[in-house]
């Protein structure tokens, strides 16, 4: 009887253990399946993002409408990558309890090697002195395996004590002492690198001063908002001479891109919708050798007097939208000379595209309006002009003009004739009549690119210059005052000009603040971004040679 009970108990334990193993195996397989699914979802999101980036590169005129889509895809990819990693770790944990199931191994993209200029710390694991197999001490090194791990060193703070010793002459009792060092700002207790960090974080990374102060406090550095604001004002004042040099360089251009965007400005108990105006000089599309640069101005409203004041000395070509405030600049009696208008085809195309966006209509379903065949045909015709422009981007102005005369002028004539024919058939209330009238009423200004190789087809250079500001509004919400908006305009000009010249704005600002107080006025141009880039590259090239 006892033996039978023991046998039954052993059999029950075996059955229970077998059931547990089967359950663990099923759980591990389910975890593997979930990890596999998450990995594939992340891969699909990654491929979608790459496809949209390629489309944005190839179809540059579509960049404005795809910017939000790219942001959404990047956020989606971030979340899916995190979920895939969590599921992979869960699969590994589940497989550890199942003897018959192998853990899911996620396929990751090949990691790029770390840069050579990063500081490296070599940690050598102590090797055995005796053979773990036979105990012999006769070991000889065959080689080594190196595993690289990327690590970060927390920001280091230091106080620089500048000592100026005093001496007295025993003969004449005259006291001598070296002069005090120059500081970028009055009462300069903040070094140039820290000052550049504060300004770049505020205006380049859109981190308000209260958040910077909180971050500093976490690192045991007590710099209040008032102190930081004082240094911001001093730093902008110190950099103002460079802003004036950049402004003079921009306004001396043959052609400018102009645009503006809204900026909430704090007023009495509310905010008002102010404006930040951007003017960009970029001669690279027509083979120009002058360095690119951008300037910004701030205003409380959008009245036409502001661009008239900004461009009062400019007499070249202005590429912009059809904003009526620019009309005074094109007046024939303007002194010293009228500005030549060149309108943006991307603005015109966008109005047609909104009426012909098949993908957007598909998402709307039954509530979608009918696709306009006229708008769809207009988009196709305009896109052919953009295709020609991509082929000639970067060529000299004369070469661009020759290609346009041969290929674009016939298309322009056909497009104008077609638009006028279609407009004669449309009623006044037709939705597509508005974009057609927008172009036909200003046709000479739209077609001017076919007469001058320096003109671009779009005003995207100015729109790109304002993109960071549009994103930053979400972080700081509004400018604290009119003067605060003016300070922001100065720093945006410095930072954007540095970026246009492919240099690190933070490194450049740090060097500027270290030297600007002591450099003579007649050598101030040496601190301009393109001059600074040349001066830093020449020693590096000489060393490499």
Image (cartoon, rainbow, N blue to C red):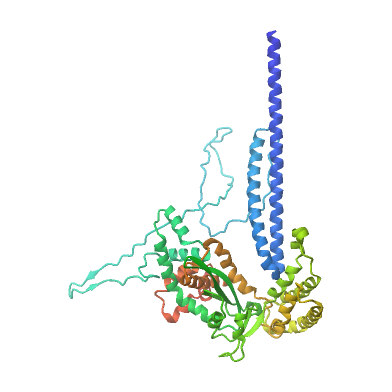
Can residue 288 be seen by looking at this rendering? Answer: no
Q: Is residue 156 left or right of residue 444?
A: left
Q: Is residue 526 left or right of residue 185?
A: right
Can residue 34 be seen by looking at this rendering? Answer: yes
Seen at 68% across and 67% down, the residue is: 63
Seen at 59% across and 85% down, the residue is: 329
Residue 527 % position (x, y): 48, 75
Residue 117 % position (x, y): 53, 60
Relative to 374, residue 452 above or below: below
Q: Residue furthest bottom?
A: 333
Total numbered labels placed on residues in the image: 0
Pick the quarter of the image with the N terminus.
top right
Seen at 49% across and 76% down, the residue is: 243
Q: Is residue 169 left or right of residue 113?
A: left
Of residues 187 and 284, the one nearer the viewer is: 187
Relative to 516, residue 228 above or below: above
Relative to 508, residue 363 above or below: above
Q: Is residue 247 left or right of residue 431?
A: left
Quadrant of the image occupied by residue 305: bottom right
Quadrant of the image occupied by residue 273: bottom right
Relative to 22, residue 198 above or below: below
Residue 101 % position (x, y): 71, 35
Seen at 56% across and 67% down, the residue is: 469
Of residues 365 and 60, the one nearer the viewer is: 365
Q: Residue furthest top?
A: 1
Of residues 488 and 454, the one nearer the viewer is: 488
Pick the quarter of the image with the C terminus.
bottom right
Residue 26 % position (x, y): 71, 34
Of residues 10 and 468, the one nearer the viewer is: 468
């Amino acid at each position: 009887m006892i033996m039978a009970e023991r046998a039954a108990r052993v059999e029950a334990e075996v059955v229970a253990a077998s059931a547990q193993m089967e359950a663990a195996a099923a759980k591990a397989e389910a975890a593997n399946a979930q990890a596999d699914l998450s990995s594939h979802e992340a891969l699909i999101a990654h491929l979608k993002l790459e496809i949209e980036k390629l489309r944005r590169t190839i179809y540059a005129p579509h960049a404005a409408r795809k910017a939000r889509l790219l942001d959404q895809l990047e956020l989606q990819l971030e979340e899916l990558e995190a979920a895939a990693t969590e599921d992979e770790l869960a699969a590994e944990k589940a497989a550890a309890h199942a003897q018959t199931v192998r853990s899911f191994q996620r396929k990751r993209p090949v990691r790029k090697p770390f840069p050579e200029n990063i500081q490296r710390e070599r940690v050598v694991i102590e090797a055995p002195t005796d053979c773990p197999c036979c105990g012999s001490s006769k070991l000889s090194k065959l080689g080594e395996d190196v595993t690289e791990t990327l690590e970060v060193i927390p920001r280091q703070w230091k106080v620089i004590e500048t000592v100026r010793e005093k001496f007295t002459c025993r003969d004449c009792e005259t006291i001598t002492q070296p002069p005090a060092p120059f500081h970028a700002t009055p009462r300069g207790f903040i070094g140039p690198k820290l000052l550049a960090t504060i300004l770049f974080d505020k205006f380049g990374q859109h981190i308000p001063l209260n958040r910077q102060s909180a971050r500093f406090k976490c690192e045991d550095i007590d710099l209040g908002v008032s102190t930081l604001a004082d240094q911001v004002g001093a730093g902008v004042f110190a950099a103002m001479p460079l802003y004036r040099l950049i402004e003079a360089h921009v306004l001396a251009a043959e052609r400018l891109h102009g645009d503006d965007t809204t900026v909430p400005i704090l007023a009495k108990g509310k905010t008002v919708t102010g404006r930040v105006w951007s003017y960009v000089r970029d001669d690279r599309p027509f083979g120009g050798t002058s360095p690119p640069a951008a300037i910004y101005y701030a205003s409380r409203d959008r009245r036409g007097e502001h661009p008239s004041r900004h461009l009062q000395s400019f007499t070249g070509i202005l590429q912009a939208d059809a904003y009526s405030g620019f009309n005074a600049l094109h007046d024939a009696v303007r002194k010293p000379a009228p500005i030549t208008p060149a309108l943006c085809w991307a603005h015109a195309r966008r109005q047609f595209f909104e009426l012909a966006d098949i993908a957007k209509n598909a998402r709307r379903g039954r509530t979608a309006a009918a696709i306009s065949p006229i708008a769809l045909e207009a988009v196709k015709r305009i896109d052919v002009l953009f295709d020609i422009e991509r082929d000639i981007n970067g060529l000299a102005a004369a070469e661009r003009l020759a290609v346009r005369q041969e290929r674009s002028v016939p298309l322009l004539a056909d497009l104008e004739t077609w638009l006028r024919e279609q407009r004669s058939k449309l009623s006044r209330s037709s939705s597509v009549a508005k974009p057609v009238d927008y172009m036909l009423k200003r046709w000479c200004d739209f077609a001017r690119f076919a007469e001058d190789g320096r003109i671009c087809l779009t005003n995207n250079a100015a729109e790109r210059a304002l993109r960071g500001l549009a994103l930053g509004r979400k972080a700081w919400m509004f400018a604290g005052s009119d003067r605060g908006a003016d300070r922001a305009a100065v720093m945006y000009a410095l930072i954007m000009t540095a970026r246009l010249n492919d240099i690190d704005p933070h490194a450049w600002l740090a060097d500027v603040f270290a030297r600007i107080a002591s450099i003579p006025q007649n050598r101030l141009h040496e601190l301009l971004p393109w001059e600074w880039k040349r001066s830093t590259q020449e020693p590096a090239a000489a060393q490499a040679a």
